[in-house]
Amino acid sequence: MRKQIAAANWKMNLTLEQGEQLLDGILSKPHSLKADQQAVFAVPFPYLLMAQQKLAGKQNVFVAAQNCYSKKNGAYTGEVSVEMLQSIGITYVVLGHSERREYFQESNRLLADKVNICIDYSITPIFCCGEPLEIREANTQNEYVAKQLEESLYHLSAEQLQKIVIAYEPIWAIGTGKTASSAQAQEMHAFIRTQLAGKYGAAIADTISILYGGSVKAANAVDIFSQADVDGGLVGGASLIVDEFVAIINALK
Ligand code: 13P
């Protein structure tokens, strides 16, 4: 059974106090994480330790960084290494979010290096892929996503690939309130799994969790997560609201 994951991406939002209140609020509500389900909180770097401390000892709940650098250490002012993240107990890193690709020119090639260093340090990348609106309108989203997977992941061995979580986030659905329909999400997730199966075999592809991201909220999470190849969500705006995110956690199948 694949892991089902509800991942919060706070992006560049909240003060420390607001972040603490949000986590306290979520933790105070009843939620039902089964053995194969996880909640993950991708918080800004300055809040990683705070979040680690609040979630310490909680079952199936993890903290993620939103990015890391591709080098081990050295003169890279302002960057954060996976060694640093590992040293404070972080086990997940979001990589290749479309905002990082767009505003910070992160390429498939750079992301391949980031994936490698995460795996070297036993940190699970939540590898983001997904097409912009013009690609969807031209109906070439499959080719676009296939290239992202090929250039950033296909150098991995089967064993390494199984350490990755994939998040499909169509850019036209991020922060727009315009969710992909559950059928559109399922179609792309099935395509991604077929691509992985073509490269690594169906048994391996079946073990990879593929999350959907893009305007997931309490009102649509059950529908989206119920799709056969959707293994949870990567959630922006709705993850900043206690009741919304608790409902999204509880919508995992
Ligand atoms: P929204 O849920 O705000 O659309 O953001 C999605 C996202 O980018 C999560 O990484």
Image (tube, rainbow, N blue to C red):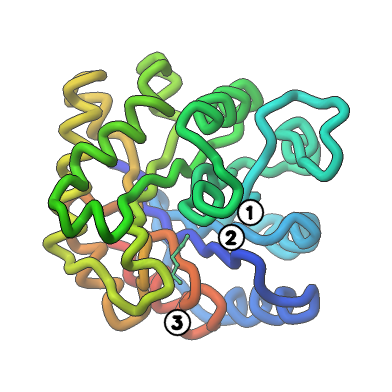
Dots 1, 2 in contact, CB < 8 A:
yes
- Towards the viewer: 180 or 47: 180
Q: Is mark 3 on a helix, strand or loop?
A: helix
Look at 71% across and 56% down and name the residue there: 56
Pointer 3 residue: 244
- Answer left or right for 44 relative to 116: right
Relative to 224, residue 123 above or below: above
Amino acid found under the numbered disc labelled 2: Phe
Dots 3, 2 in contact, CB < 8 A:
no
Report, in whole angstroms, how far the alpha carbon at label 3 lies from the one at label 1: 19 Å
The x and y percentages for residue 167 are: 38, 49
The x and y percentages for residue 234 are: 43, 59
Amino acid found under the numbered disc labelled 3: Glu
- Towards the viewer: 101 or 96: 101
Report, in whole angstroms, how far the alpha carbon at label 1 lies from the one at label 2: 5 Å
**Location of ligand 1 given as a quarter of the image:** bottom left
The crowding category of the residue bearing disc 2, from other C-alpha atoms within 10 Å (few below 14, some 14 to 19, many at least 20), is many
- Towards the viewer: 50 or 82: 82
Dots 3, 1 in contact, CB < 8 A:
no
- Answer left or right for 99 relative to 19: left
Mark 3 or mark 1, earlier in chain: 1
Look at 20% across and 63% down and name the residue there: 226
Mark 3 or mark 2, earlier in chain: 2
Pointer 2 residue: 41
Relative to 197, residue 40 above or below: below
Amino acid found under the numbered disc labelled 1: Val
Q: Is mark 2 on a helix, strand or loop?
A: strand
